[in-house]
Image: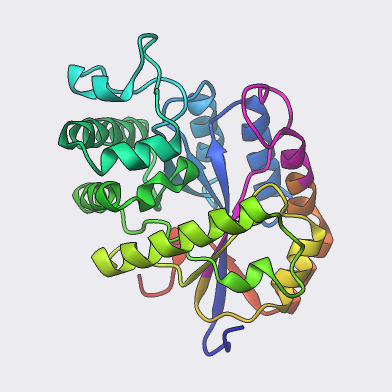
Amino acid sequence: MLLCLMTRQMIINADDFGLCEGVNKAVAQAHSKGVLTSATLMANTPATDKAIAIAEQMPSLGVGIHLNLTEGRPISSDPLVEPLINEKGEFKYSVYKLAAKSAMSERLLSAIEMELTAQIEAIINKGIKPTHLDSHKHFHCFGPIYKIVCSLAEGFGIGAIRWPWEPATVCSGDWPRVGTAARIRALLLRQMTLNCQKADSRFIKNNIFFGAAHTGRIDGAFWEEMGRTQFAGTAEVMTHPGYAQGLENTRLVGQREAELKWLCEPKTKEILSGAGIELIHYGQIDGK
């Protein structure tokens, strides 16, 4: 574990804000009654506008943008985005196929840039000042796409991009056990993030990340170990709170309610406070 050398800050972010009513309700509850400090908003999902209305009523909630190229329909109507969509007008690639094809196709990269620009513009035009950017299933960490996202962050004046570098220790020791697939996913992500850091570190504002290996398993045991873990600087914890309402076509249905429970559990706040951890969002990182 890392030696604590400075003030310890933690961003607790809810992904998928705007996905559906159940997620929106959970985000509002986890912020007003729990430890959630941040949420990332999807631009092209059914409950986006209602999520924005919630954010307007919660000025202390940091709101970033959850870029999305694998679920639903694109925001852009420009014919240039056609390489991303199927005959129904929906995004056609899984995250793995998107990674492979983006490394080989300039035409696809142009489509990606067009669509991501449209998503950011759509959110900003509705009155949100984004604290940061991240992405659905971390596709922004793929080398060619990461360069595009950095360019967009610069162009739109967005100061931070999620850096999901999670230490290997979360898959061992006293952390709740995770399966082989989770360990492999975390390992691949860790390697990609190191390449991102080498390519462009200007928008990396968090020092460490938690929640990749334990996606869908952010429970009491997780928070107990989080309180015992030493880190320096700013950590982000990725969470996925939600109610089952509207979640029929996505994964992590039952797990979302469990994550919400522990985000709102008084014990969780006690653990983090007792560890000397200050809760912030990306817009509040000291000196950034």
Is 170 a magenta residue? no
Name the colouring of the figure.
Answer: rainbow
- Whether residue 63 is visible here, answered yes or no, is yes
The magenta-colored residue range is 235-258
- Whether residue 200 is visible here, answered yes or no, is no
Quadrant holding the N terminus: bottom right
Q: Is residue 43 left or right of residue 279?
A: left
Q: Position of residue 75 (x, y in %)?
A: 33, 23
Residue drawn at 26 percent across, 44 percent down: 103
Q: Is residue 177 above or below residue 141?
A: below
Residue drawn at 45 percent across, 32 percent down: 94
Q: Is residue 238 above or below residue 272?
A: above
Of residues 152 and 252, which is closer to you in this image?
Answer: 252
Q: Is residue 264 above or below residue 196?
A: above
Q: Position of residue 196 (x, y in %)?
A: 32, 62
Q: Is residue 115 above or below residue 256?
A: above
Residue drawn at 21 percent across, 54 percent down: 154
